[in-house]
Image: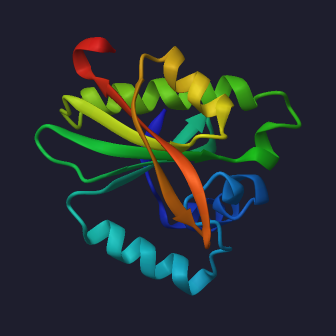
Amino acid sequence: MLRDVMDDDLPLMRRWRNHPRVRAASFDPHEIGEEEHARWWEATRADTRKQVLIYDHEGVAAGVVSYSGLSSEGGSWGFYLDLDGLEPSGALLPAWIGLERAAIEHAFGPLGLTTLRGEVLACNEPVRRLHRRFGFVEVGAYVRDVDGVPRDVVAIRLRKEQS
């Protein structure tokens, strides 16, 4: 379900990330241009503390899972999905659940993490509910500047023994 990013995935990744609803749930909501995306990808590929993978749902590229701050004990993660491709067919919720399951399995399997952390905008209740469904615990909250606006953020954590 998770696989390495191929060069022809890059335009899809940028299009999915630039979807207005994905940007609205992001900590950096500006629209990403092609050159900026290419620079980000080059830096990400060179960073051994990061890993970005494509989530395939029923054999079709449908989302992105990113891990950062990877160390022997833990790391952080984030994701986004192809909303325009999944919603019309009613596949958004199954893909979302599948992506979360695959991301957790990858973190505690191939990546060998013991702790998986993340952050979510406090107003994003659907994502918070899904994370709780998979065992994530909300461990803190703080205010973060997002595009010049103070936003409430919730920190989450899942330990391997809890998954």
Whether 90 is drawn above or below 83: the answer is above
Location of residue 44 in the rendering, given as x and y in whole percent from the top left corner? 35, 68
Whether 137 is drawn above or below 81: the answer is above
Name the foreground residue: 10 vs 145: 145
- Could you tell whether 108 is left or right of 66 in the image? left
- Residue 34: name its quadrant: bottom right
The residue drawn where x is 23% and y is 38% is 111
The residue drawn where x is 47% and y is 23% is 101
- Residue 9: name its quadrant: bottom right
Location of residue 85 in the rendering, given as x and y in whole percent from the top left corner? 79, 45
The residue drawn where x is 53% and y is 76% is 37
**Extreme-left residue of the structure:** 72
- Could you tell whether 28 is left or right of 102 in the image? right
The residue drawn where x is 45% and y is 44% is 119
Location of residue 154 in the rendering, given as x and y in whole percent from the top left corner? 48, 39
Q: Can the viewer see residue 154?
A: yes
Name the foreground residue: 51 vs 59: 51
Location of residue 104 in the rendering, given as x and y in whole percent from the top left corner? 38, 28
Rendered-image quadrant of the C terminus: top left
- Could you tell whether 53 is left or right of 149 in the image? left
